[in-house]
Amino acid sequence: MTLDLALDVNGLQKAFGDVRAIDGLDLTVAAGQVHGLVGPNGAGKTTLLRILFGLVAPDAGTVSLLGHEPAEAGERPTEGVGGFVEEPRFYPYLTARRNLELMADLDGGGDTRIDEVLSTVRLDDQADRKVGGFSSGMRQRLGLAASLLRRPRLLLLDEPTVGLDPTGARDMLSVVKTLSADGVTVIVSSHNMSELEGVCDGVTVMRDGRSVWHGSMERLRAESPAPAHHLETTDDVRATELAKSDRRLEIVADPGGWLTVSADREVLDAYVVALGKAGIAVRRLELLMTALESMFFSLTGERADPVPAAREPDEIPAAR
Amino acid sequence: MTMGAAAVTVADAPRERAGVGAVYRVEIAKIRAQLLPRAAAVICVLAPFAFTIFINTQSSVPADSLFGRWVQSSGFATPFVLLGFAGIAGFPLLASVVAGDIFASEDRQSTWKTVLTRSCSRGQIFVGKTLAAMTFSVVMVALLGASSTIAGMLVVGRQPLVGLSGALLDQTHAITLIVQSYALALAPTLAFTCLAILFSVATRNSMAGVIGAPVVALLMVGLSLMGGGVVIRSILLTSPFEAWHGLQIPSATSKAIWIGLLVSLAYGALSLIVAWRSFRRRDFAGDGQAPFRWSTVGRAVVATVVLVAILLVGTLLSKTWITSSHLEASVSETVGNLIVVQQEILGRALDPAAVKVYPYCKRESVISGTSSGPADDWTCQVFVDGPHVSRLAADYSIAVRPDGCYTADAPASLVGPLHMKTPDGGTTINPLSAFDSCMIPP
């Protein structure tokens, strides 16, 4: 039996009291793809994953996972579906290895791949430590290890890089790519569009429990507005005038005292060169948001953080 | 499993399915790894030894407890004394250590999402956890029973024990009764285990789960101490903890035991049904333990007060089954047996059928009318006729407890001193000077 769709969600609804967490969501994910679920906090990503795992019963709608329709919350989770929702948690008084052994028991037992999955997530040297002493990032990696024990064909990962250092996040996404190359369908939720950019084949942007954009990553890139940068020069007035001569550039004076420039990379490169030729030094040029982030913010109605935080700066040295 | 880039081949190799057994094994492994259950097991093993050693260094004995006056005379008294204590709130507390936490701990540790996303259904998880909690309760009862028996035998000795009917219990008979008595205590202990599971599921809070069932037990003990009739006592879950009394009284029917089993079954089944309905329908939409809410506590307190008030009114209005005729029947049987035991100690064989006992019991505070109810002002004038004991008369002061058990003491001038000499020159307790027994509810 072959499947075209690993996930098929139709008309899904879920409310908690007066809050409509999922509001008529339709979503399909092709088998073998890495699909991103993106949205701000409260968009319904985690609730959707909880419904897919059977932790929460939907009020209405249908869900098909790997061709199976889970009868209702409380039934045995669909075979071949693994992953975690929110930060993975384990029994703190047991070691990582013992936790995985118990998880393997709950999957039918006899799994001899514990060392293998621990090695995959680079926890093999911590296997005999009690999980109570683990950092958030280590628990995240252990969560992935526990998910891999189920030999998933559909992997659901909720914010998998939260709590991980840059190396850990890169490793996590690398594992996702490897699994995808092996044919595993992966659905990754995140509120950070840029981290999914190099991983996902497709993406669904969620807001208020609904899908506001769904399609391939290529299409998203094509439809995305230009990336935005913060710009500080030795003469912002002349820099603004110079920008206005090129219609492909959009420049706005920020109340904070700098300029916000939106343009594609090639246009921006040409503009920076032009500034130099005009005798205007660039003191600071900093990526405010990528093209995908710009798209994300326009789709979700979120506002960009005025000060980029926790991101590797895409800066050029200040020209003096 | 072969997968392409755009299609997944779903023909998996068959995999062993996880079930209740897997959940049970996992839960047992978790229980064994946790500090509190291990501490409870250690306490069950060591506490009887500590109790026995302590009590045997004291000049007095807990004479107001069944078999309390025998704890320095026979090692077989220790498990019965501890069984009496444990039935008040000890077994409910031991049962709650695991059962009250086994569901709520998953909330506390936010591990529900980890467990529920494996290959077991909620039903299998519920049953597996329940069986594991019950296993722990059974092991605790068995440990306490075995440890108290061994402690008594090692510290005090294997002397015969005078049972509740006044008959002498040799080693084999005493051990058999101990095993049977602790086995009977399993039924209400398991029911309290189910009640603790209900608290654990419903409150999603470990503290509430662990203390809920013992608090219920203490409330029920409080209600039972207020006396009351057979019906109210019968529906209290603490009453089956007293069912073992009937094992030692030949004239007792097995009715009390069956009622105890049925009441335990009813409490257990009802608790599990409600717990399962709550667990099955639950949305696991967030992490962490249920927050402490005064409104929830307030509702629980109001519900408890209403329930206790109803039972209290029922208790106070219902007619007591403890009457002078019941007490006289019990005293007659017990004293008859005690006289046979006493004469055997003195080296005189006596046919029990030849001993006639005529008791007349009343409460000192009752001037006219029928004496009834639990109280410590009962007196029984006992006239005995038979070989070697012709025209023996004794006045016993008797304290009757709401559960129908009583302790009886007689002045030495009438029945002889507390200690008496045996034909071989030794000293032993005069069984007629004081004794414990129980009336069995009709």
Image (cartoon, coloured by chain):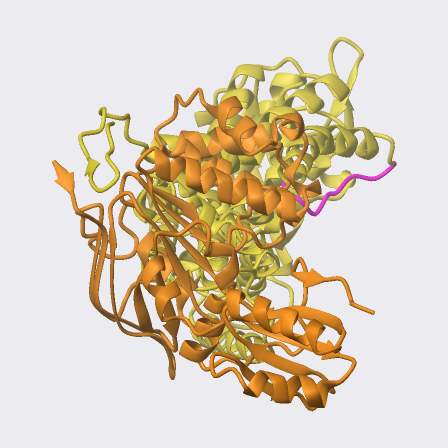
A47 to A236, vertically: above or below: above
The colour with which the image depicts chain A is: orange
Q: Residue at x 56, y 26 (%)?
A: A119
Quadrant assignment for the N terminus of chain A: top left
B105 to A133, vertically: above or below: below
Quadrant assignment for the C terminus of chain A: bottom right
Q: Residue at x 69, y 36 (%)?
A: B39
Chain shaded yellow: B
Magenta segment: B59-66
Task: Indicate left or right for A122 with B354 as reference.
Answer: right
Task: Indicate left or right for B317 with B76 as reference.
Answer: left
Q: Residue furthest front?
A: A277
B103 to B349, vertically: above or below: below
Q: Where is residue B278 in the image (x, y as percent from the top left)?
A: 36, 61
B138 to B319, vertically: above or below: above
Q: Which residue is drawn at 79% across and 14% down?
A: B426
Q: Quadrant of residue A95?
A: top right
